[in-house]
Image (tube, helix red, strand yellow):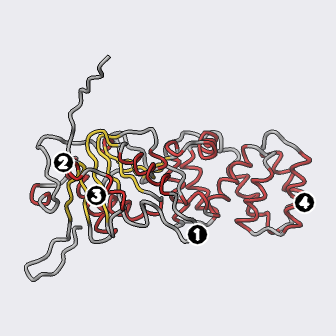
Amino acid sequence: RLLQPYSGSGAPVCHVTAESELSEGIFIAKEINRMVGGIDMLEAQDFPLHREEGTVRGFSDLAVLYRTHRQSRILEKCLRKEGIPYVVAGRDDFLADDHVRACLCFFRFLLDPRDVLSLRVCLKLLWNCPEDLLQSFTGYWEKAAHPVLTEKVLFEAKHLYDNREFLKKWFALALEFIPRIQREKPIRLLADWIKQAGYTQTEPLEKLMNTSVFHTDMPDFLQNLLLGQESDLVRSMGRSYASGAVTLMTLHGSKGLEYPVVFLCGVNKGMIPLESASYPSDLSEERRLFYVGITRAKEELILSSSNEPSSFLSDIPADSLRSVSVKRRTSAGGQQLSLF
């Protein structure tokens, strides 16, 4: 039986070269705004990707892919500057931060007082609790083996350990949040915990809050962080979006997903394929990841580089690749003007 395709061949793959990572991020943000009809025709002339008129995209039609999570920082800055709603999918680096780990362990123990390992991690990371006190306090909970933590149970433990300075803050926070943990949304619980624990203006904790906005209860949120796949872990700019948002994710996280338009940024030597002084690059695996990235695009694919381009670009047939460069505008006197 003959398989008959119904979709057209689409636009040629476009390779955009920018002057720096920041210029690359600015280009992507501006081009997204142009695609959704968010900039005027005069500003659109600063960017060389002219397409058929009438193709207006929604934010949820667009994805920006990259090799490592580190690359998202500049992209997020540029998207925020342009007012573009976005979500970042994947197991981000902020989850390894000590404050984030301690915060999550605090709530895990409140939900399951038999999880003494979480209690130990929280006390050690936040208050550097001495080892002898850690052994005594975690041993107490192991022997008690309470399946549920209640205010009564907490007061009993507090009576035994109330004279220990390292535990006073923990007891105060536990008594504050145990009545609320099952009935309030994670974002509210996290916001209050961060404030009362004295860790405001901490970027990793802010990212944790932005991840929690997609969950209605703390048990579901913690379960998702523990067991969720790359594409299940999502954070936003601080709210959920009814009208959709651009998706940012790594090449690993994009497996199995498709978007009408895909930007694959950082297609540079040293990044794709990823090279490290500690670990030799596995070219076959890196080539496969690159293939995964470019095949996420259903209709339009835009590759961008800010340094020496990746050697993988030579694998794309020349007649299927359109190469352009973007530069910041200059004034009449030759001075560079910011695209912002």
Real-space CA distance between mark 3 and mark 2, rounded to the nearest whole angstrom: 14 Å
- Left or right: residue 331 versus residue 260 is left
Residue at x 74%, y 49% (from the top left corner): 109
Where in the figure is residue 184, as x and y percent of width and height?
59, 42
Q: Earlier in the sequence, mark 1 or mark 4?
A: 4
Where in the figure is residue 110, as x and y percent of width and height?
73, 47
Q: Residue furthest top?
A: 1
Q: Of circles 3 and 2, which is in front?
A: 3
Amino acid type assigned to the residue bearing label 3 in the image: Ile
Amino acid type assigned to the residue bearing label 4 in the image: Ser
Where in the figure is residue 318, as x and y percent of width and height?
22, 53
Real-space CA distance between mark 4 and mark 3, rounded to the nearest whole angstrom: 55 Å
Q: Which mark is residue 30?
A: none
Helix, strand or loop for disc 2: loop
- Left or right: residue 29 versus residue 205 is left
Where in the figure is residue 212, as x and y percent of width and height?
53, 48
Helix, strand or loop for disc 3: helix
User: Circle 4 sits on which residue?
Assistant: 136
User: Circle 1 sits on which residue?
Assistant: 278
Foreground residue among 95 and 298: 298
Q: Earlier in the sequence, mark 4 or mark 3?
A: 3
Q: Of circles 2 and 1, which is in front?
A: 1
Amino acid type assigned to the residue bearing label 1 in the image: Ser
Tags 4 and 2 in contact by the CB under 8 Å rule? Answer: no
User: Circle 2 sits on which residue?
Assistant: 37
Residue at x 63%, y 63% (from the top left corner): 99
Tell me: residue 72, above or below residue 236.
Answer: below
- Left or right: residue 93 versus residue 295 is right
Q: Which mark is residue 28?
A: 3
Real-space CA distance between mark 3 and mark 1, rounded to the nearest whole angstrom: 31 Å
